[in-house]
Amino acid sequence: MKELKAVLANWEAVIGLEVHTELTTLQTKMFCSCKIEYGAAPNTHVCPVCLGMPGALPQPNKAAIQSIVLAGLATNCQIQRRSMFYRKNYFYPDMSKNFQTTQGPVAFCMYGGIDLEVTGAAACERDQRQGTRPLASGDGYVTPIGIQRIHMEEDAGKMVHVGGESGRITGADYSLLDYNRCGTPLIELVTKPDLRTPEEARLFLQELRQIFLALRISDCSMEQGSLRCDGNISLRRRGSEQLGAKTELKNMNSFKNLHDGLAYEICRQAKVLESGERVLQETRHWEPSARRTVSMRIKETADDYRLFPEPDLAPYDLSDEFVASVRAMLPELPAARRTRYLSDYELPAADARLLAADNDLAAFFDSALLAASANTDGDLSASGLGGGKGGQAKSVRLVTLAKQLANLLLNDTQAYLNVHNFKLVDTSLTPEHLVQLAALVADGELSSKQGKEVFAQTIKEGTSPRDTVNHLGIKQLSDTDALQAVVNDVLARFPDKVQQYRAGKTGLLGFFVGQAMQATTGQANPQLLNEMFMQTLAE
């Protein structure tokens, strides 16, 4: 088959996603009081309602309705005041009552969308002439991705196929059924076919995951199955508006599998079409180990499910007061957070994206910014935190500290957390300590290397950076008189290299600075040394 890049030169992929998200932060299931608990012993959280026993009547979970309305508001959907549940009939062992309770044509949330930022190498995969606008940072584009609906349904149980090599039902000796998951509230978000590349699909799912995590409606664990994604994909010749026959791709249970599965299917469909054959409308399964898709079944239509209104549940009428109360629960969303970090603190675009994507890091960063802005005395002002006189000087100071704080969080802190498999709450690090360390480095009292040494002690022991500096006797040497003596000594020891530098070999400046750093056991201010060597050598 052709490579993806070669295929996309002649064909345009039309991709829509169906994203299934379990509302795992809720305590109980959608229509009964059974507990939601991942990893519990099989069939220990079940009852007549979620097992579909005769005569058992469902009772809706109000918190689940609040969660889906939150999701709809966060993705700019229209909240439908009146909707209802239907029965979606099918025979499969993972749903013992032989139908799934789901929403019909009108869902709680309809006709929304988000603006997707596409950056880096991903921005090269798409023809950007239509429907996109360039990012202000210049490293990509923004494209609107429409959301057709977000509807509520109940999850099915879990089947475990024992025996065989693939872990699938084909070839298995027997299958086990665990109904603990059955009845768990699940929201399904269906996009419009606005995605054009596998990378756009991956970035969209990542953005959606960040939104749902910020809303705290799910843990969004793809490994545990609480966030799952199916893809609908078709091809058409570039310039054509006519949609081709689509396939639905299953089992894309990671961001990488989503990208790779879609990429393979694009190339496979191009091969089929270029050979003069037609693409079948079918459901296909992505096999990561074989790196291929295989046919599962011919695609069902809505008629196959014999949908009809659920007789045991009355229609829903959401009041304006209810929707307003849910809207008041909306937190700052990742996109708004990114914009704030870029505009207010002038963070590099990559740093703003990484911080905004992680709720814990973002909350810690914001707390540190608050401490940096509010504290003007004590240990913080001793490190120069108060800045200069006047609002403008303080604003510049805060921007400087914000960049240093972001660097400490995204590099030193993240590295420590990854090595020790910790979360921020598991450490002794406080926002005030991080601000103090950022000020010490920003003011030149500590070099970057010394800052890392102090950071390691602070996050391990919980001691303040200032106390650690005093205890260890660490301080960056910035005394110009003392450093001038070091500069003169280095130049005196290497007269041949001084001559080479003055003859045009300016790269030797790094050698001179390195020698001076050795002579001061790494405590000299390298930036100041750099300036002093240049000035002395120019005389």
Image: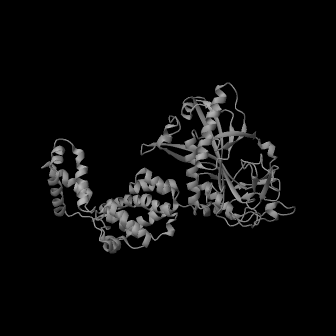
Left or right of residue 279, residue 400 in this image: left
Relative to 428, is 104 on the left or the right? right
Q: What is the basis of the colouring in this image?
A: one colour
**Residue in front for this viewpoint, 348 or 149:** 348
Q: Residue at x 21, y 42 (%)?
A: 505
Can residue 80 be seen in the rendering of this structure? no
Q: Position of residue 95 (x, y in %)?
A: 79, 55
Report the residue that reaches farthest toward the right: 54
Residue 370, quarter of picture:
bottom left
Q: Which of the 4 image quarters holds residue 291?
A: top right
Is residue 14 something that shows in the picture?
yes
- Residue 144 lies, in percent from the top left, at 55, 44
Residue 501 percent location from the top left of the image: 18, 45
Residue extending furthest left? 539
Is 517 located above or below residue 131 in the figure?
Answer: below
In this rendering, position of residue 390 left or right of residue 124: left
Q: Quadrant of residue 386?
A: bottom left
Judge left or right: residue 339 versus residue 51: left
Q: Which of 36 and 43 lies nearest the eye of the viewer?
A: 43
